[in-house]
Image (spheres, helix red, strand yellow):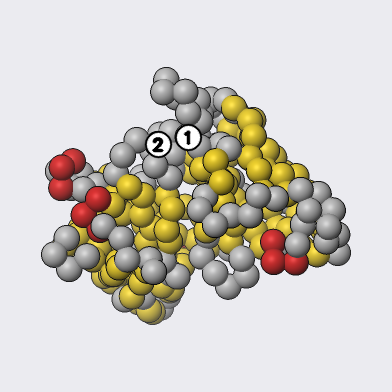
Amino acid sequence: EVQLVESGGGLVQPGGSLKLSCAVSGLRFSDSAIQWVRQTAGKGLEWVGRIKTKPRNYATIYAASVKGRFTISRDDSENTAYLQMNSLRTEDTAMYYCCRRIDTPGSPVDYWGQGTLVTVSS
Amino acid sequence: DIVMTQSPLSLPVTPGEPASISCTSSQSLLYSDGYNYFHWYLQKPGQSPQLLIYLGSNRASGVPDRFSGSGSGTDFTLKISRVEAEDVGVYYCMQDLQLPLTFGGGTKVEIK
């Protein structure tokens, strides 16, 4: 059974930091490009960023709204991806999902985690 | 960024009847390899999105054949031939032709 399990969400004050984890099982993690997507009631689904695989140099890219504040990393030995979030703002409040696609052209995002809730509030 | 526009916003349906959802993109999603980089997802209540249709018209593994996707370029349609109670939820279209990945605003399907 394929599972992506996010953890690390919670309540944090504006300006604070949080690190989310995404533990993957049931598929070849090393072949998977990992995306982070967030969801709010007001803005719907918003892509946050992604990290590619080792053959593609673990390349990362981010949405403009989080660039310079968020960092995606991965540990293939642990089948886990991470989202480090710094300088958090109230507008970063959302459900955060990790999801994956096989790192080849044309492959869709096919598996999603259950999400972890991040609330940024004083 | 590519803007994805879905309609309708809400779709009340009668079990056993057909249903149709449209999605329009602000740019063509047809790539030089002949594929439309366009997908449909269903988010059931309390769950994360699940892949229904990929590359415009291909059903994902385990998806019932009452679901079908069509369209090319900028205009796409998801059809449910006979709606069942388990089909309720919010349907999203998504493009991954170029970053950032972008999603439609969603269509909420509910039983009348």
Q: Mark 2 lies on which chain?
A: A
Query: Where does label 2 land, which residue?
Result: A106
The residue positioned 58% from the left and 54% from the top of the image is: B63
Q: In this view, does A6 lie above or below B78?
A: below
Q: In which quarter of the image is residue A5?
A: bottom left
The residue positioned 51% from the left and 30% from the top of the image is: B36
Residue type at numbered disc 1: Tyr
Q: Where is residue B85 in the image (x, y as percent from the top left)?
A: 75, 66
Q: Where is residue B70 in the image (x, y as percent from the top left)?
A: 64, 34
Q: Can residue A89 be seen in this view?
A: no
Q: In which quarter of the image is the C terminus of chain A?
A: bottom left
Q: Is residue B76 visible?
A: yes
Q: Is residue A40 above or below residue A53?
A: below
Query: Where does label 1 land, which residue?
Result: B37
Mark 2 packing: few (<14 Cα in 10 Å), some, or many (20+)? Answer: some
Mark 1 packing: few (<14 Cα in 10 Å), some, or many (20+)? Answer: many
Which element is circle 1 on?
loop
Q: Position of residue B11 (x, y in %)?
A: 78, 54
Q: Is residue A84 above or below residue B20?
A: below
Residue B97: assigned label: none
Residue type at numbered disc 2: Gly
Foreground disc of the pair 2, 1: 2
Which element is circle 2 on?
loop
Q: Do the residues labelled 2 and 1 touch (CB within 8 Å)?
A: yes
The residue positioned 65% from the left and 49% from the top of the image is: B65
- Left or right of residue B30: residue A107: left
Q: Position of residue B110 (x, y in %)?
A: 76, 63
